[in-house]
């Protein structure tokens, strides 16, 4: 679920088949994570599954996963190994080195050195990444801030890191779409102002602060309706927070949805309250759809959203500031329209799938040429 799934599916399905034979290897998502493949939100790729490869740390499963990935690499004999996310990045790069792959790459899809682990675990993770960087031909950052962080934390020198922004199939989001059917389905009254968030319901996304911000915004916009798109381990707790804030009647938890263009069309404002982010997928998609954005000023978000030009940036964890920004935009249709139009121009073609595939193909061929 999320940017890495979109990224790898696009590359698997769109790399030039006359030049590249591609094998996608994937772990098993958790029970509450959801799958963009099952939702139909990504190309119908057929990944080779490694059931033992999951988010949870499990020494026995992790040894099994490494063995499985190594076996796949020995059979496929790749010229290029390109890994994504932490654990798959570790196992894939080790396997690539052991089978003698000429080019080994890893993409960092976010600022993962803070907010995800405790202090001690973060230091261990950074040390492991320094070791893995030495066996990598190149590291790929998806934002300028991500590249700076890799250098500042001593993961690798500047010359070993390339910047390749994410890419998405933005065309469905750029077409005029009606949100009236979604509003009717969710029981949103005609003309009611709406704010939404699209996120995994996990601690790093801080959706509880979004809910508190909605409560604050309703003081200025009494008819406000909030829509929470996504699922995850925190859903039950967040529904309890919603009830405690007196928002049950005006807040809709809708789970994961395949019809994101229609859902976005039903919203007036799209929010993001993450404590940390790489390149925010939901924000890029919302900008492509011409939505006004309120997002926390963390990680790679300011690389995507220009404060006051393509959206509003607010401090993380500050429900008062986030709620005030949401309320201000909902009361000012002209400003919403101006921000939304600028946002749509800013993300296309910069974050389009065609640009991503072209960048990666050129990088692959350049690195293979260097090692021919």
Image (spheres, grey):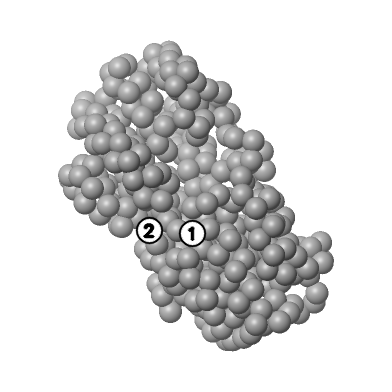
Query: In x, y percent, where is residue 364?
Result: 32, 36
Q: Which residue is mark 1?
A: 274
Q: Mark 2–mark 1 contact, CB under 8 Å?
A: yes
Please state which of residues 261 and 151 is positioned toward the viewer in this rendering.
151
Residue 145 is tagged as: none
Per the image, label 1 sits on a secondary structure element best described as loop
Disc 1 crowd, CA 10 A, few/some/many (<14, 14-19, 20+): many
* Image quadrant assignment for residue 47: top right
Q: Is residue 64 left or right of residue 210?
A: left
Relative to 219, residue 141 above or below: above
Q: CA distance from mark 2 to mark 1?
A: 9 Å
Q: Quadrant of residue 133?
A: top left
Q: Is residue 360 visible?
A: no
Q: Is residue 82 left or right of 257 when viewed as pictured?
A: left
Q: Quadrant of the N terminus?
A: top right
Disc marking residue 299: 2
Residue at the image position 60 percent from the left and 69 percent from the top: 212
**In the displayed structure, does residue 208 sit left or right of residue 362?**
right
In what quadrant of the picture does the C terminus appear? top left
Any part of residue 225 in sight: yes
């Amino acid at each position: 679920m999320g940017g890495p799934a979109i990224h790898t599916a696009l590359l698997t399905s769109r790399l030039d088949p006359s030049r590249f034979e591609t094998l996608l290897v994937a772990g098993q998502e958790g029970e509450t994570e959801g799958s963009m493949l099952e939702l139909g939100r990504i190309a119908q790729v057929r990944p080779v599954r490694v059931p033992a490869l999951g988010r949870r740390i499990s020494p026995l499963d992790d040894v099994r996963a490494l063995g499985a990935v190594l076996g796949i690499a020995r059979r496929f004999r790749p010229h290029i190994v390109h890994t994504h996310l932490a654990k798959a990045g570790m196992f894939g790069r080790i396997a690539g080195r052991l089978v003698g792959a000429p080019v080994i790459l890893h993409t960092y899809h976010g600022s993962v050195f803070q907010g995800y682990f405790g202090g001690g675990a973060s230091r261990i993770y950074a040390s492991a990444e320094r070791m893995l960087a030495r066996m990598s031909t190149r590291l790929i950052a998806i934002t300028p801030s991500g590249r700076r962080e890799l250098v500042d934390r001593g993961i690798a020198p500047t010359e070993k890191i390339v910047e390749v922004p994410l890419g998405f199939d933005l065309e469905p989001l750029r077409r005029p779409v009606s949100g009236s059917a979604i509003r009717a389905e969710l029981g949103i009254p005609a003309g009611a102002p709406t704010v939404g968030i699209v996120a995994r319901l996990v601690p790093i996304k801080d959706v509880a602060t979004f809910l508190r911000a909605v409560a604050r915004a309703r003081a200025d916009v009494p008819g406000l309706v909030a829509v929470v798109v996504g699922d995850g381990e925190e859903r039950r707790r967040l529904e309890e927070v919603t009830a405690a804030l007196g928002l049950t009647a005006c807040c809709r938890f809708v789970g994961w949805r395949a019809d994101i263009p229609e859902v976005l069309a039903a919203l007036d404002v799209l929010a993001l309250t993450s404590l940390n982010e790489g390149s925010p997928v939901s924000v890029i998609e919302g900008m492509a759809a011409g939505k006004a954005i309120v997002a926390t000023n963390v990680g790679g978000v300011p690389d995507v959203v220009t404060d006051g030009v393509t959206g509003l940036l607010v401090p993380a964890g500050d429900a008062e500031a986030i709620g005030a920004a949401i309320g201000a935009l909902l009361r000012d249709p002209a400003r919403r329209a101006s921000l939304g139009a600028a946002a749509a121009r800013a993300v296309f073609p910069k974050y389009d799938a065609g640009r991503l595939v072209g960048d990666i193909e050129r990088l692959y061929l350049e690195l293979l040429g260097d090692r021919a």
